[in-house]
Amino acid sequence: MTETTLVPTTERVVGLTRQYFESVGATVRQDGAELTIEFDGVAPPEWVGGYCDRSRLVATVADRAGSETPTADSETAESETPTADSETAESETPTIGPETPFTRRLIDAAATHHPVGTASVTGVPGGAETLVPPWLRASPARVASVEFYPYYDGRVVCAWLRAAVETPSQYQRESLHAVVVDPETGNRIDCDPTALLDAAESDAGAGAVASESDIERALVEARSHVVTELDKTIEHAEDSAGRAAAAAFEEYAERQRARLSERRAERNEIEQRLATIGDRLADATGDDRVELLEERAELTDRRAELDEAVSRIETADADGFPAERERLQRRHSVAVRTRPVAVTTVAVERGDLALELVGDDGRATLDLSVGAVTGPRRTPSCPDCGSEYGPQNELRVTTVGLACADCRDG
Amino acid sequence: MPVEIDHEAPEFDTDADPQPLDTHRASTFAQRLRAGEPDDELRSLGTVDESQVKLLEHQVDAAYRALFEMDGTALLADEVGLGKTIEVGMILKEMHYRDTSDSVLVLTPAQLAPQWQGELREKFGLEFVCNYDDAFAGFDAHDYVLASIDTAKSDRHRETVLAREWDVLVVDEAHYLRNETTDRYELVDQLAYDYAFFLTATPIQNEPADLYNLVTLLRPGLFGSRESFDRYFRSDDGQTRLVDREELHARLSEVMIRNRRAETGVDFTDRVVETRTFAPTAAERRLYEATTDYVQTAYAENEAQRLVAMLLQKEVVSSPEALAATVRGKLGNPDDTDVDGVDADGADADGAVDAGDTGDTWASGVDHDWEATDATPRYPERLRSLLETAESVDSVTKRERLFDVVDEVRERISGGHVVVFTAFRATQQALVEALTGRGYETHTFHGGHGSERKEKIVSAFETDGGVLVSTDAMNEGRNLQFCNVLVNYDLPWNPMRVEQRIGRVHRIGQQRQVYVFNLALADTVEEYVLDKLFHKIDLFQQTVGETSQILSGLASDGRSFEDAIFERLVDADAAVDLENDFDDLAVDLAQQTALSQKVEQFNDDVFDRFDLGADSD
């Protein structure tokens, strides 16, 4: 699981029910374990049709015992596996809870309902202090104050991707990843996507609408990042697949060697019979001789077949059964698929980050051009030598202003 | 191991109008919840329409284990009647849901292919192209292919089948692969696939080596050498016994799932079957004899007329109207391929084949072509005479007797629902008119109705009661278990189709005893089929699985059961010949039934006390 994943508890599923149906214009009312969804003036989504009575849907919230503990959820899920008595769309009240058929349909419908969205973030989520770059925090200069002054709007794209890692020995592992990308640069922004969206507001305005090329650029970076995030999962799948393939290969090789023994044994037996026939032919006449000659011909053909079979298996064995090895490698290969499932464009502010810095030798101010979410756009340089500040070239506060460590010490 | 990375296109339209966060949030939240579901669960379970298929615990468990616990290859070997097809349907559904099955190949005996196609479509929403479909364009032209194994291994197709890397391979009646020297075995041995699921209730047919060969296809070397496998068994006085039970069980549990009926609690209510045979009127007898005579002559002269001849022979015992419709069609426009209100390929309004008219011919595994090379009707004068005779029948015996059955049912059996099956729309029309004229609440169901209309018809039948007159377009998925009385007004020659009809009412979930009435005209092919064949093997008390096993055994030479009936009919010179020929066929059928039972018993004995079913770890 990734950080974007949420275990479907009863409470979360009830929350989704509310969110989804309100997003289609229905009103949702809960009274104890009963949830009533009214579609006055709006058409119910098609999938809901069978559950609805006129313009109303009444559902029951499943037992809340599983809402706190994911383990309890999976036990609940087993007992709610659809059986002969479980709900049908036609005749019974649907149940809202983990693993119920209604919930499955709800999740599937909601997931694809509005996959493209916009939002806006005002100010700096987490406060201006979060924008202080690491190289500055690591320097001897102390940040006495920091203020963010927004001047214009920018945007970031949060791409949601579903990733699947599959190999026959463990079937499939799926995960959801959210990656925030600056569409102008195509670079990933190191921030928590879910925290960003939690801080976001709905009213985004035109500035939040990303172009198709923005989205495409964001997806390229997101895909690449997801594959990196999947390293461990892929490694685990490769191990599992490798073990399965190795075990299958050993079984195959053992069987081939057993067949080889069988063929050799049969060939030896035929050799002995041919020798016996040879002896008998010396004295045989008439029909007996004809019969022996026919039998010898048959056995000779069979020996030739066995010779060929033995040779084939011996060669393959000496080469390490390459055809089977290749077949197993192909069969047990690990398939990794990514697919974007949603995209959220977030309008963010850009501006200046004004820092007041204090050092042993005095005070100074530093202005950085930043995005409220993306952080500093560039690393500033020493005014004397022009080299960029960084971990190897720390910023210092001097009596005459700012300088890099080389210039101050040198 | 090789790692293949595939970045797929977005699930959504990238230039769609974006929605504000408060409406968009439900989508991202739903995606997060979806991702939170355990990987090793059957996620598509909740999407299966329970009005079409009732999943049983052992079936869900088998699907789960086959997919998650067996390294992608499994032998599904439940006892007959427990729904192995459902288990595979569930596996394929899950793989489709998760997008892990781009290409699927299902191989079955020829006569079972249409049934598979119907079941996968109706119960699981999975569309397969069958090699008997007109739309079939080769094994490399479609992603989901269902085919007879003999077609797949034919010279025409073999190379294409082998050249393709299949994601999933399913082999039904896999015991036909028991002999490693056959072409079938060789084909499957050489196929390239990621996942494979074999189905058979009887992995052992003749000897334990059958099991070795079958399992070796799935897991080469699981049993080691043949010699080491043979050590699990010992032969005493011609009887083979399992001696190393524990070791065999341990090995088999890695690849085989076998559920037993006794353990699953699958329980069917009783089925009461009554066959009523009636003497036809003189006019009906004349019509029957004239038709049989025509059929024998036309077929003897040109075997390409077989399908039409078979149709006429079936229609004459159904109703004069059905026969007349076909004859009129042949006379009115010899090139007109519409017969009995059905398109030439049997396609109806929503594309499904009205199986009673053409579906039976699929069983023979040949392409059905209504019009043979000769477009001119044979013996037009005789056809005109047939038509006159048909039109002169003013009293239809079966129809009159049907009213008796319906009245009797209403008196003796509570509930008031009766479903009457007929293969022919003209018969259906006539029945509906007659029943309505008599004041019965009547409903009609056939392949010309769209899906929504079909739903409404069944719903009205359930609510209002009365009589539903249906053709064989009522397919596998349709559930009529609120009804417990079924009348076979005419009888398909294919026992599988009979079972499918009965399966509409007699299925898991039916609470009441089921009554099946068969109506037949005396001294006709229908009586022979019923009396000498179906009753002889106790067909009406068998499950679909048992019937398909028997038929698979009979059709080893590629001919269908229907062909076997028809050929006896047309070859008989006299009634006594016909009787003898049917007796011979009955003997074959009985032998096959006995053999099937014996094989089942042997498998039971071998796998007795093996814990390979639901809940086994």
Image (spheres, rainbow, N blue to C red):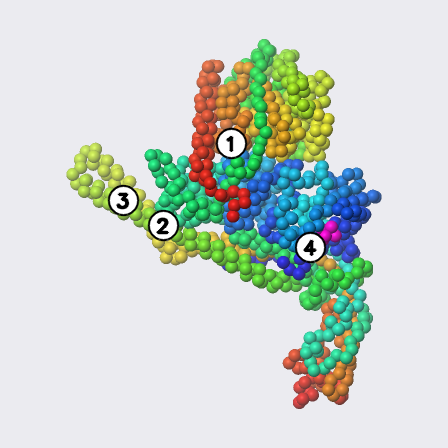
Which of the chains bears the disc numbered 4? Answer: A
Q: Nearer the viewer, mark 2 or mark 3?
A: 2
What's the amino acid at mark 2? Ala
Left or right: A318 as drawn, with respect to B600: left
Q: Which residue is mark 4?
A: A68
Q: Position of residue A345 (x, y in %)?
A: 74, 60
Real-space Cα separation, disc 4 to disc 3, in angstroms = 74 Å
Residue type pointed to by label 1: Glu
Q: Which residue is mark 2?
A: A258
Q: Name the disc covering residue A162, or none.
A: none
- Mark 4 vs mark 3: which is more N-terminal? 4
As helix, strand or loop, the secondary structure at mark 1 comes to helix
For this rendering, which residue is in front, B560 or A26? A26
- What's the residue type where badge 3 is placed? Ile
The span shown in magenta is A8-16
Q: Main secondary structure of the magenta part?
A: helix
What separation in Å lies between label 4 and label 1 (alpha carbons)?
A: 49 Å
